[in-house]
Image (spheres, grey):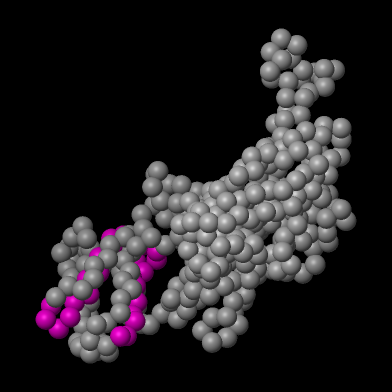
């Protein structure tokens, strides 16, 4: 864009059914350009328009000003790309890189948050986002790299087609308390072969009440902390996946291990479940019990989700404690929240 009001044109020969991606890198390269793309056929009919295509991997970009079109060509024809600045600006600094190609299937992975507190003999939960490109939709299996003593990653899979999944990282009784750096890798069948991608730790941040950014961090830092007063464990199927039909229930056996004399009921809650999955069991007693999930009749075969089960308990404060309030007695409880675990669910016929 050498001058304000300029527009650059490009042409290419396309085949019927050809899937193409037209992508502009300008703002992501430091250019002030606010790109707009138009795809036209040989009769100059506009087939697609793009402005401000969001890219969650670009950190704290204050404006997703680059453009992108993913399109399947309807016929053998000569096609045209018109590129301009949507604000009509231009100049020698308004540089860009334009790509017209069939994008290869691929993926990138981001783990949120970038720091974890894992109680010994307990678990921490994180979310892994899959940034899929080129039509890639296969399942991604996650694993810990190396042998971090006493740290285990329970069955961790991003289902086919899903853009994120919750994972559970556990500290066994053998884990030493303190800080350590963890590395994870995602593996999938992609583009005709096995592909491995590093899981990049990140923080999920919001900018200007609009864009959410997965801002990459240098390391995934985990603190193995002293044990929580209670641990709740579940008995999953052998392959870790709970399978159910629409309109049915999922029944999960839970066990509770206490480390003090509190021994109270634990309130349960699901974090951001889909509409078709609800929690019937609101509380388990001091020994544990069945956790029952209801699957709506509206669920469809093939639906998958990894949903987080949380627990909350209230423990009375010791009257001899300096924190004990003899007047406002309703304040004399310590609220403890625990991540019980991730429940992967698949709806079957």
Residue 207 in percent (x, y) is at 43, 47
Residue 84 in percent (x, y) is at 21, 67
Q: Quadrant location of residue 280?
A: top right
Q: Quadrant location of residue 335?
A: top right
What's drawn in magenta, residue-wise? Answer: 17-44
Residue 239 in percent (x, y) is at 70, 68
Residue 118 in percent (x, y) is at 74, 49
Query: Is residue 191 shown to the viewer in this render?
Result: yes
Direction left: furthest residue: 43
> In the picture shown, does residue 209 fall above or below 108?
above
Left-right relation of 122 to 47: right
Residue at x-position 34% and y-position 77%: 21
Residue at x-position 57% and y-position 72%: 139
Of residues 306 and 39, the one drawn nearer to the viewer in this rendering: 306
Of residues 135 and 31, the one drawn nearer to the viewer in this rendering: 135
Query: Is residue 216 shown to the viewer in this render?
Result: no
Residue at x-position 46% and y-position 47%: 206
> In the picture shown, does residue 145 fall above or below 220?
below
Q: Is residue 26 magenta?
A: yes
Quarter holding the N terminus is: bottom left
Q: Quadrant location of residue 175?
A: bottom right
């Amino acid at each position: 864009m050498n001058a304000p009001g300029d527009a650059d044109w490009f042409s290419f020969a396309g085949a019927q059914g050809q899937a193409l991606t037209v992508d502009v890198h300008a703002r992501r390269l430091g250019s002030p350009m606010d790109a707009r793309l138009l795809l036209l056929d040989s009769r100059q009919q506009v087939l697609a328009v793009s402005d401000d295509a969001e890219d969650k991997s670009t950190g704290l970009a204050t404006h997703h000003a680059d453009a992108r079109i993913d399109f399947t060509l309807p016929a053998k024809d000569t096609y045209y790309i018109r590129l301009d600045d949507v604000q009509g600006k231009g100049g020698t600094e308004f540089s860009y890189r334009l790509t017209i190609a069939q994008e290869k299937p691929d993926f990138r992975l981001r783990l949120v948050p970038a720091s974890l507190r894992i109680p010994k003999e307990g678990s921490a939960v994180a979310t892994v986002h899959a940034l899929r490109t080129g039509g890639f939709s296969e399942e991604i299996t996650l694993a810990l790299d190396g042998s971090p003593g006493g740290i285990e990653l329970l069955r961790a899979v991003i289902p086919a087609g899903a853009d994120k999944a919750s994972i559970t990282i556990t500290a066994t009784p053998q884990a030493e308390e303190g800080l350590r750096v963890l590395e994870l890798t995602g593996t999938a069948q992609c583009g005709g072969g096995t592909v491995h991608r590093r899981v990049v730790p990140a923080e999920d941040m919001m900018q200007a009440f609009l864009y959410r950014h997965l801002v990459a961090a240098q390391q995934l830092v985990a603190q193995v902390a002293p044990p929580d007063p209670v641990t709740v464990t579940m008995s999953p199927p052998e392959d870790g996946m709970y399978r159910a039909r629409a309109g049915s229930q999922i029944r999960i056996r839970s066990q509770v291990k206490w480390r003090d004399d509190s021994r109270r009921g634990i309130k349960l809650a699901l974090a951001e479940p889909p509409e078709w999955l609800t929690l019937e069991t609101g509380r388990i007693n001091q020994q544990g019990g069945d956790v029952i999930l209801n699957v709506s009749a509206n669920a469809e075969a093939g639906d998958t989700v990894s949903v987080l089960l949380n627990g909350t308990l209230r423990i009375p404060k010791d009257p001899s404690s300096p924190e004990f309030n003899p007047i406002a007695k309703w304040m004399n409880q310590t609220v403890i929240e625990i991540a019980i675990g991730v429940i992967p669910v698949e709806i079957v016929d």
